[in-house]
Every structure is written in C-alpha cells, then in structure tokens.
Image (spheres, coloured by chain):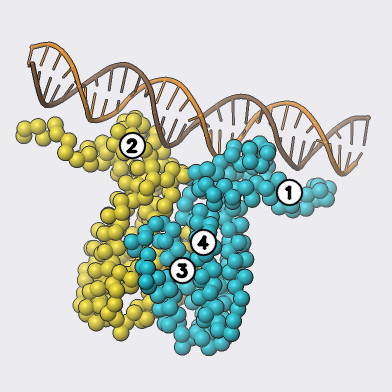
Chain colours: A cyan, B yellow, C orange, D brown
Amino acid sequence: MLSSMSSVPVPEASAVRARLLEEAARILDEEGPSALSSRRLATVTGTSTMAVYTHFGSMGAVVDAVATEGFRRLIDRVGAVELTDDPAADLLAAAVAYRENALQNPHLYAVMFGAISVRGLGGKGPDAEVAYAAFRQLVALVERAMAAGRLRPGDGKAVAAQWWSALHGYMMLELAGMDQVVRDPEHHVLWQLMENLLRSLST
Amino acid sequence: MLSSMSSVPVPEASAVRARLLEEAARILDEEGPSALSSRRLATVTGTSTMAVYTHFGSMGAVVDAVATEGFRRLIDRVGAVELTDDPAADLLAAAVAYRENALQNPHLYAVMFGAISVRGLGGKGPDAEVAYAAFRQLVALVERAMAAGRLRPGDGKAVAAQWWSALHGYMMLELAGMDQVVRDPEHHVLWQLMENLLRSLST
DNA sequence: TCCGCGACCATAACGCTGTTATGCCATGCT
DNA sequence: AGCATGGCATAACAGCGTTATGGTCGCGGA
C-alpha cells in the first residue's frame, strides 16, 4: 500500500479538484445555491459528474469544501487589515473588513455558517480546524487589545466569542434582507453595537 | 347553518391547507430540510402533490409559510414571559425564552432567517409583517425599560436591533455547532454578551 | 330538477437533481 | 511484457419540483 504514495501524496494536489472547487465557489456566489449542481459543475469544468465523486465523494462534500474555502478567504481578508497602534480601532477595522467580505460573497458567507442548505444536501460542515483558525485570528486581536490596556483583561476567547456573535448576528440580519430592522441610515446599527460592546469591554 | 362551508372568504380557512402547513413544520423540525418534499407532504397528509399547488402555488411558498409560522410561535413564546417590575431583567428573560424556542425548533429557526432556504427553492421569505411584529415586540420591551429608567433614553428601534443582532448571532453560532467558539461551561457567552450590552445601554 | 361551472385533487408526465454501476484508457509498478 | 490501479465518460435509477390533464363533487341559476 505504500507504493501508491509516490504519485498521490495529497489528494488536494489534483488540478481537477482545484478547478471544481474554484468553479463551485464562483457559481455559488454569482448565481446562488440553486445553480450549483453536479452536472453544471461537470460542464463548466469540462469533465463529467464522476470527477466530483472521485475528488470529493459527494456534492455535500463539495459544499463543505466551498465553505472551508470561504473561511480561508475571510482569514486572508481580515489578516490584510493594517494594524495601528490603537488595538481597539483595529478591532473595528477588522469588523469593517469582515462585513465587506460578507457583502461581496453573501451566498458563500451563508454557506460557511450553514445558514442555507444548498439544495438540502448538507454535509458535515466546513473544516473545523480552518473555521477555528478564523476564530483564533479574532482572539489574537482581542488579546492584543487587552495587553495594550484598551480592553479589560480577561478571557480572550470569551470576549472574542461575544464580538463574533454580535458581528455575525448583524450580518445575518442584513443579508436576510431585514432592512426595516437593521438599516438605520444615520446611525448604522452595527457600529452602535460594536461601540457599545467595546465600551463595556474597556477598562 | 346556512352555507357555512360554501363560501370561501379567506384561502387560509381551508383545512387541507392547515394540515399541509402543520405537517411541513413537523417534518422540517423532526427530520430536517432534506426530508421536506412535495411528495412526502402529499403522502403524510393523505392527498397528492397537487394540493400543495392549489393551496400554496409552490414548495417555496410552503417554506415561506412555515417560516412565517415560526415567527408566530416565537412571538407567542416571548409574549408568554411574565413581566416583572424590572424591565431590564425582563429583557434577559425574553432572551431566555427566545433561545429556548430556537433550541427546540432549530431547523425552523434557521428557515425563518434564511433568505434562501430549503433545498435551494427560495421563496420571497417569511411574511414581512409578521417578522416585523416580532421585532416590534422587542422594541416594546426596550422602550419599556427606557421609560422605567433602566435603559438610557434613545431610539428604541436602534437599541432593539442591536439586541436582536447579538442574540441572533449567538444563536446561529450555537446552532451551527461551533461549540469550541461559543460553548463556555462556566461563563456562558450569551449571558456575558447580553450583560455587557445591557451595561452599555444603561444610564 | 337539471344543468353547468368552478373548486379541488388524483394521475401521469417532463426535465432536473444526486448518486452509482459499468467500462474504457492511460499510467506506473513488477 | 503484463498487469493493476487511478481517473473519468457513459448511462442508468430513484427522487425532486412542477405542470398538463381529467375527473369528481357541490353549489348557483334556470
């Protein structure tokens, strides 16, 4: 059994698999969940539906892989914000980047959190390690603000979980089209919420 | 009893429609989104798939009706909390009822906020008036706390939107199975979040 | 009373879906 | 060379949402 390790060290190394994943994410973002199907994926990648099953095993696994890819993009996007000497302001800047990423890829964002089931084929969800890496990224920002004295010292993970809950909840309401609830032209609800939370968490 | 069954003043008066809606909500809650189909709905209600289309027009409309029913149940559940002379504590009690309702009907809760929902067949979403009634219920609790001086006077809708965002975001993370992020045995993240928000909103 | 009409639904079909069985073919190991 | 195996095309199957068709039943008008 060790003989086959030479040709295929890692399944992710396949070029076909990469194109399937890329096209799946593109179709999901551009045309929504109902447009993502195995046959559609096969035609746009120039293969057949069997390619999906050799590389992923099921369409649900494709959706999971797309969700995982969404977390990777989120991590890249939030990681690209330039840190200043004000860790509290950086937390708000990260929230801005988080919101922009969600607004640009709304379907992908919804799939990441299982908010929408793509045609009822629900997988096991995104890769837990990647999703947790996105959380740890936020924890690092929080702990940095604590170390600088801008946030009251405490459990960074507990504070990050609160921050993420508030941010995620607002995004879901905004993406769900609940404009009457969430759209406040003069005083944007999200920034009031972030500032209120920040005030309670400050020293 | 002159022609009590003859006239059809409101389509909702149909008994078949009521059973379809009831069974749809039950199937969704007990077996998840992938189990809800037109044929399944027809067999369990003892009719054919055409009944779905005569009473709803499409499966998407059924999902929308189920989502609207979910908001009605939420309103009933939150409206059942007994108000005390501490409006701030009542807000927390309402959050407890909100969470219990979501945990008991997780799939229904997800459908309520899913712009695109079951099996990729996206309807127009739940009845906006009913969903907004749930929001107004929360606004009333907030304004009551403001009038009693337990919350700083301000825009009740803006504060209610923040409260709902935080609560909804935590629920979505909890229901998404992100236990590592959100599950904190000793200090439950939700109550820390609610108390932090309450502190910032207090006078 | 009878007729007709409209609401309601059972049956069957169409095109789509995810998935699987089968077989071909190229590649690499022995 | 022979063979085994991974990778994919073809075609099929069951199930999906939806629609066309036809039948049945009950009421309103003549």
Count residues near mark 4 (Cα–Cα under 10 Å), then give few for <14, some for 14-19, many for 20+. many
Count residues near mark 2 (Cα–Cα under 10 Å), then give few for <14, some for 14-19, many for 20+. few
Query: Is label 3 in a helix, a strand or a loop?
Result: helix
Tag 3–tag 1 contact (CB < 8 Å)? no
Q: CA distance from mark 3 to mark 2?
A: 37 Å
- Residue type (three-letter) at the residue carrying disc 1: Ser
Residue identifier under label 3? A167
Residue identifier under label 2? B57
Kindly indicate whether the residues beneath marks 1 and 2 are on one polypeptide chain.
no
Chain letter, disc 2 residue: B
Chain letter, disc 4 residue: A
Q: CA distance from mark 1 to mark 4?
A: 29 Å
Q: Is residue B106 left or right of residue A1?
A: left
Q: Is residue C6 left or right of residue B125?
A: left
Q: Which comes sooner in the sequence, label 3 or label 1? A: 1
* Residue B157 - label: none
Residue identifier under label 1? A14
The residue nearer to you, when weighing B182 against A35, is A35
- Residue type (three-letter) at the residue carrying disc 2: Gly
Q: Nearer the viewer, mark 1 or mark 4?
A: 4
Residue identifier under label 4? A102
Q: Which comes sooner in the sequence, label 3 or label 4? A: 4
Chain letter, disc 1 residue: A
Q: CA distance from mark 3 to mark 1?
A: 36 Å
Please identify the quadrant where the N terminus of chain B is shown.
top left
Residue located 62% across and 70% down the image: A80
Residue located 46% across and 85% down the image: A202
Q: Nearer the viewer, mark 1 or mark 2?
A: 2
Residue located 47% across and 52% down the image: A116
Q: Which comes sooner in the sequence, label 1 or label 4? A: 1
